[in-house]
Amino acid sequence: MTVEKPVISGINIKSSQNRLLIKNGRVVNDDGMEDADVYIEDGIIKQVGRNLIIPGGTRTIDATGKLVMPGGIDPHTHFELEMMGAKTADDFYKGTRAAVAGGTTTIIDFVLPQKGQSLIEAYNNWRQKADNKVCCDYALHVGVTWWSASVKKEMEQLVSEQYGVNSFKMFMAYKDAWMLDDYELTCVMEACTELRALPMVHAENGHIIARNTERLLARGISGPEGHQLARDEEVEAEAVNRACVIANQADSPLYIVHMMSKSAVQALETARLRQKPPVYGETLAATVGTDGTHYRNACFRHAAAHVLSPPLRPDPDTPQAMVEALADDRLQLIGSDNCTFHEKDKEIGKDNFAKIPNGVNGVEDRMSILWQKGVNTGVMDPCRFVSVTSATAAKIFNLWPGKGRVTAGSDADIVVWDPTLQRTISAANHRHAVPFNIFEGQTVVGGPQYVIVNGRVCLDDGDLRVAEGSGRFLKTPVDSPYIFGGDAPSASPRPQHHSPKDSPIKISNGNGTPD
Ligand code: URP
Ligand code: ZN
Ligand code: ZN
Ligand code: ZN
């Protein structure tokens, strides 16, 4: 993993001055737990073990009774994104500040170019927005929202060392905005195969949604409940299956973002069994922590605040089913898709649900919500919690083991987790820029007591002390060994030479040469 260390005002604020010892805790990684101390110097974990020899003057954090885990990696945020006529409220400062407060120490945001816009130009805009604001490290996925030879060229450039992008997101929804057709999806996935990059999809059938929306509006259904009615589970599941088939045809791995329904998970499960290049599924804190009954709330502000795509499901079993899928590896990761909008922006869709800007909060509460719903209920153990909140994202996006692991040599991105810490989630004290929280009133037990970002204690016994601009941009190299296993891509069939009609029949061995 390569990082840049910008120097601001002559002081290299990127390197930690601190030496830190986290003592008496239980270190939790995705593959096991051990009682061990962790010694950190200059932003790097130097030693993990017992009876460490530590220089004098080192600050000690007593982690007795606490879990010492890799800081969370949120693979899905939207900070300072302009969409549907509005701009998200959480910018890169407030968004990453909220992330750190909740135990997340790396976020991966999406560069989303407009149709026709240069991908590189959009990437540069994102870097400009983020670099001097982020309070933790960040990387970027790039959206492919249109297709041409020039887009392919730009993808080739973006995966180079100069830009450091290894993942490209496509939309099967948002017709007339970001949606690609199946031909374009195939082309982008083929390009990813060539580049050893990872295609990601937003899987919903945009055509069906568009037609359903017309029908609902014509029947006078214009409120937020229409958002859900236009996007049934099967509309998501169909797209999941189609995306997997396209990836299989393109001999490409695939990452499906924000999976929101049991049917979608079922479609993914089938594909994971049949496909060789792996397919991964991400779900969200939103779907684990709340449900689609809110779309029927009489208050527009309340209902609209829950509008995201795919929508929350009315089926009351969905949250638990998603936690179970995360626990038994039918789903691999949990993100937030943090994409908050001010009330006045959600009001754009007051008379037409299709115009409500899509997005919810989640980057701050993602870890606590999953701990509450998954670990406290006994559905998953702390190792699996680390896997789905941090380690697997590090592996997939090729940040491993610098990120996602508490071990000597890794970045000192650590959360000291107090499994007894009790908190009631509320917009009254959350760190988001909006006065609404979709998890409002829920009590969670278990949360971060200390959050260490690159060796700096940013949450100090509950006290949040982040430094704006102190995070680094992480270049993510292609060819993640976790995805591609170091193998060469499977051989694609070569053209077969067909003999003229009346020439003697030759048997081809499929290599274009006769046997
Ligand atoms: O509703 C959502 N998910 N908003 C963010 C954009 C996207 O589709 O990821
Ligand atoms: Zn999406
Ligand atoms: Zn209300
Ligand atoms: Zn998103």
Image: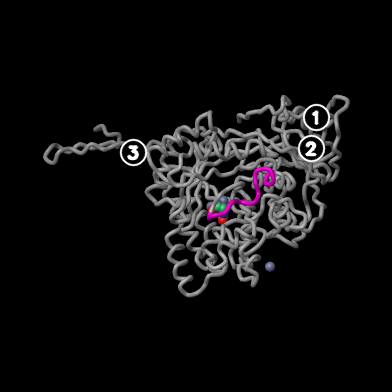
Q: Which residue is found at the position 86% from the left and 42% from the top?
A: 64
Residue type at tag 1:
Asn
Q: Position of residue 277 (x, y in %)?
A: 47, 42
Q: Between residues 440 and 267, which one lies in front from this camera angle?
A: 440
Assess whether residue 95 is covered by the magenta stretch: yes
Where does label 1 land, which residue?
A: 18
Where does label 3 land, which residue?
A: 493
- The image shows residue 428, relative to residue 42, as above or below, that is below
Q: Between residues 217 and 380, which one lies in front from this camera angle?
A: 217
Q: Position of residue 232 (x, y in %)?
A: 51, 65
Choose top left, top right, bottom left or bottom right for residue 66: top right
Residue type at tag 2:
Val
Marks 2/1 in contact by CB < 8 Å: the verdict is yes
| Cα gap from disc 3 to disc 2, whole angstroms | 54 Å
> Of callouts 2 and 1, which one flags the residue occurring earlier in the amino acid sequence?
1
Tell how many labels: 3
Where does label 2 land, which residue?
A: 457
Q: Quadrant of the N terminus?
A: top right
> Of callouts 3 and 2, which one flags the residue occurring earlier in the amino acid sequence?
2
Eye-nearest disc, 1 or 3: 1
> Of callouts 1 and 3, which one flags the residue occurring earlier in the amino acid sequence?
1
| Cα gap from disc 2 to disc 1, whole angstroms | 9 Å
Marks 1/3 in contact by CB < 8 Å: the verdict is no
Secondary element at image label 1? loop
Please state the extent of the stretch shown in magenta in the rendering. Answer: 84-96
Secondary element at image label 3? loop
Choose top left, top right, bottom left or bottom right for residue 25: top right
Residue type at tag 3:
Pro
- The image shows residue 457, relative to residue 65, as above or below, that is above
**Does any portion of residue 56 appear in the rendered image?**
yes
